[in-house]
Amino acid sequence: MKYRDLNASTRTIMTPGPVEAEPRVLRAMATPILGQFDPEFTHMMNETMEMIRELFQTKNHWAFPVDGTSRAGIEAVLASMIEPGDRVLIPIYGRFGHLLTEIAERYGAEIYNIETEWGTVFDPEEVIREIDRVQPKIVAMVHGETSTGRMQPLQEIGGACRERDVFFVVDAVASIGGVDVKVDEWHIDAAIGGTQKCLSVPSGMAPITFNSRVEALLLERKKIEQGLAEPGSNKKAQPRVIRTNYFDLSQLMDYWSPARLNHHTEATSMLYALREGLRIVLEEGLEHRFARHSLHEQALVQGIEAMGLELYGDPSCKLPVVTCITIPEGIDGESVRAMLLNDFDIEIASSFGPLKGKIWRIGTMGYSCRKKNVLHVLGALEAVLLRHKAKIAAGRAVQAALDVYEANEHR
């Protein structure tokens, strides 16, 4: 045979996504296929909706996955809410703010950006001042920016949006399942998550949730398109000029409602995977899960600093599930990454744009976020850097991480 059996290498994946899939999730994906309208399967769909609500800490009725990667969820929300000419404010503090901008532009939005230095986040007051100046229909922001390893505080911005009747859309792809995301408390109107990061489910679904404010917008627009309401009756719900079918939330609402109106063939095995991944998250408990991520982050950071490496970015706004390291002067960052992969079966990430070649990014997310992996990556990184003649403090990294774990055991 020209093509051999599939035999992928077993890696220790310590990137900001994808991460190692939970073994129980992979087993769930081997579950026999059911028809998408089989009562047994629609019951699983309902259970998945319930668990997504718990994950996002919301009482929203609408909480379901969009079939596709995280970007599919982002596009579904923005495509369904934006009309050509709508003002959309997108504060940018890393690569994925630019992605939100690109998607919104494709649907005809009038974009307003403010930017801050990569490695930092915005003072909420700065964003609120810009909201007052622009008076947008939508504010779209990234919660956890994996390109810079920073996390933007959202509660104050969400409150300001609600007071001003502005929709607040949040990309929580990197943070959901690893740190707190409080949709209702933070006045988030629509939030998008990802499977391939802290949920430890393969990429291919994007859990989303949106509230009754967004639902009213979508339903009013649907009436206009069906000729049941006059354009202009709701200034925020004008008839669509650019229309998406696959990412139309109003059609997906019909699909995920008890009516089960056919929209697409559900990605059966991915739904099994998401359901099992969510079940594992909730079985662990959100608070315990967040504490676990924080513990392993602390051990990794202590090890990196004990080695003599410099962390990148403002520590006051660090994203707990991503640690960024400044590549030492004179060291070929890609050569280090290649040796980690080829000799130790460990994958870490570089970065994007102005940070490409300047930092490494190590993810401690989901199933990858465990003691064995943290100790393995610290020991291997030290060995590889010594082979590259880097000036580091040999023998200290793993010991510093072990100190963190030992101290935690005694609490």
Image: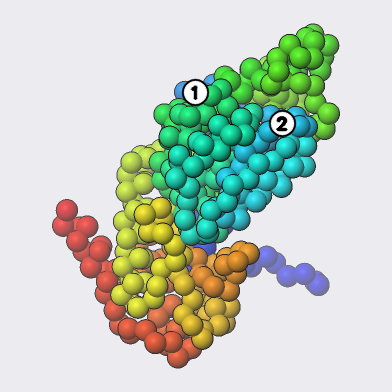
Secondary element type, mark 2: loop
Residue bearing mark 1: 163
Q: Amino acid at mark 2?
A: Asp
User: Which class describes the residues within 10 Å of circle 1: few (<14), some (14-19), or many (20+)?
Assistant: few
45 lies left or right of 295:
right
Q: Position of residue 40 (x, y in %)?
A: 59, 27
186 lies left or right of 347:
left
Q: Quadrant of residue 288?
A: top left
User: Which class describes the residues within 10 Å of circle 2: few (<14), some (14-19), or many (20+)?
Assistant: some
Q: Quadrant of residue 395?
A: bottom left
Residue drawn at (78%, 32%), measured in percent from left and top? Answer: 84
Does the image show residue 148?
A: yes
35 lies left or right of 388:
right
Q: Position of residue 318 (x, y in %)?
A: 41, 55
Q: Nearer the viewer, residue 235 or 103?
A: 235
Q: Label 2 vs label 1: CA separation?
A: 19 Å
